[in-house]
Image (tube, coloured by chain):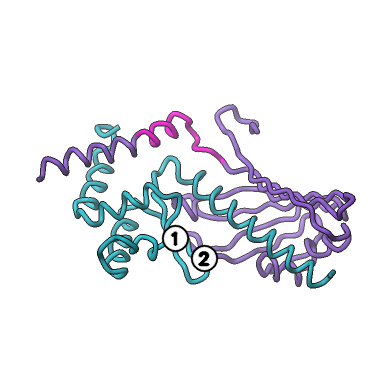
Amino acid sequence: MIDAVPNSITIVMRALADPTRRAVFERVFESKEISVAELTRGSGVTQGAISQHLKSLKQAGLVAERAEGRNVYYRAAPQGLEPLVTWMDHYGVFWRERFQNLRDLLKEIDP
Amino acid sequence: MSAVASNVETKDIVIDEVFPHAVEVIWKALTSAQLIARWLMPPTGFEAVEGNRFTFKTNPAGAWDGTIHCRVLEVAPNRRFSYAWKGGDESNTGYGSALDTVVTWSLTPVEAGTRVRVVHSGFVTPKNDTAYRNMSDGWVKVLQRLDAVSGEDK
């Protein structure tokens, strides 16, 4: 694995050379999906610093982001897994929310 | 669920709930552009007619402009409504990667109202299952190796 993709490993290791950024990545990796606010909590650094680290991680392709309203959520981005994991998680949440919206609308138009 | 090609497998998202409303009311909510805009997303060019094309707009990502391209596949009033749901771009990974799926709504009258089932189908697993497993293990190994490298630096 490591020998097979030296460039990917180099990019990964360079992005994770900073101990704080690596700690951020590990927390994202351990989470299904996590927000900047959640990452900031208990980290000992500012939310601005967390955002900068996430920007670097995103540029390295190590995390992917998803915006929902005012919040942005991050997840680890292992390439081989990502299309399935991200889309199914995204739409799993999406459709559950829409079902609730539909339920609310039906109550309104057909009490 | 297996697809035609032996090396391609797809997975579905299924949500199934009973709503305390007549099937006709729910059908209207699923097939009226005005109502769809309120509970799902504002559609552009929507008509519940087989073959009709319409779009939704969502958050863009990389090369994908965020447009979801849909086409009505089946309309069986008060029973079944399905449409193709395509988005993303081949050059993206994760959110915004190429997506070629189908959304199917099924309505069944029940004593308490109507059972509403949505199946969002066609989420393709990685083309090569070996790659799937390798990447899964690979990430753990990358992190383990980083532990070792990090230790050396101290």
Query: From the image, which quarter does the N terminus of chain B lie in?
Result: top right
What's the residue at 68%, 51% (across, down)?
A: B84
- In the picture, residue B134 is in which quadrant? top left
Q: Which mark is residue B139?
A: none
| Image colour assigned to chain B | purple
Nearest the viewer among B17 and B63 is: B17
**Mark 2, residue position:** A68
According to the colouring, which chain is cyan?
A: A
Q: Secondary structure at mark 1?
A: strand
Front one among B42 and A110: A110
Residue at horizontal 25 percent and vertical 42 percent from the top:
A9
Q: Position of residue B85 (x, y in %)?
A: 65, 53
Give the letter of the chain under mark 2.
Answer: A
Query: What percent of the width, then of the height, locates residue A67?
Result: 48, 64
Q: Which residues are magenta?
A: B124-137
Q: Is residue B79 left or right of residue B148?
A: right
Left or right, residue B93 beside residue B141: right
Q: Amino acid at mark 1?
A: Tyr
- What type is the residue that disc 2 sits on? Glu
Q: Residue at x 86, y 51 (%)?
A: B79
Chief secondary structure of the magenta span? helix
Place of residue A35 in the rendered image (x, y in percent of width and height, measured from the top left): 42, 61
Label 1 near label 2: C-beta < 8 Å? yes
